[in-house]
Amino acid sequence: MAQSQVTQLPAATATSQVTSQIGRLSQSLMAMMLGLFIVGIVGFSHIDVVHNAAHDVRHSNAFPCH
């Protein structure tokens, strides 16, 4: 007859909670930076093709731009 051993690990530790909070914070900051890049750089671009493409996308999504 074979014996098995069960090891129980803690569900969450303080370190894993801090790591997950840092991960969520960094994801939020990256999303905000991407949004600012799209609106600020692409939206106000002096390259007509890039600016017009961003302008058309804003209109197609019913986002007021002017």
Image (tube, helix red, strand yellow):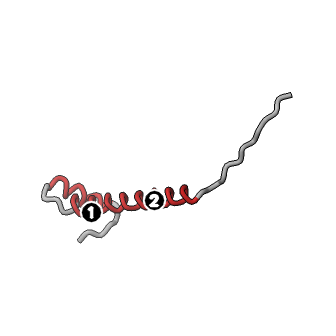
Which residue is situated farthest in the top direction here? Answer: 1
The correct choice, above or below, for 18 with respect to 64 in the image is above
Q: Position of residue 28 (x, y in %)?
A: 41, 61
Comparing marks 1 and 2, which lies closer to the viewer? Answer: 2
43 or 18: nearer the viewer: 18
**Location of mark 1 (residue):** 39
- Residue occupying image coordinates x 82% and y 29%: 2
- Asked which secondary structure carries label 1, the reply is helix
Q: Position of residue 56 (x, y in %)?
A: 26, 58
Q: Position of residue 26 (x, y in %)?
A: 40, 58
9 or 60: nearer the viewer: 9
- Residue occupying image coordinates x 86% and y 28%: 1
Q: Quadrant of the C terminus?
A: bottom left
Crowding around mark 2 (Cα neighbors within 10 Å: few <14, some 14 to 19, many 20+) is few
- Asked which secondary structure carries label 2, the reply is helix
Which numbered circle lies on residue 54?
none
40 or 57: nearer the viewer: 40
Amino acid at the residue labelled 1:
Val
- Residue 32 is left or right of residue 40, and the answer is right
- Residue 54 is left or right of residue 30, and the answer is left
- Residue occupying image coordinates x 65% and y 54%: 11
Crowding around mark 1 (Cα neighbors within 10 Å: few <14, some 14 to 19, many 20+) is some
Which residue is situated farthest in the right direction here? Answer: 1
Amino acid at the residue labelled 2:
Ile
- Residue occupying image coordinates x 32% and y 58%: 34
Q: Are marks 1 and 2 in contact (CB under 8 Å)?
A: no
44 or 9: nearer the viewer: 9
**Location of mark 2 (residue):** 22
**Picture quarter containing residue 51?**
bottom left
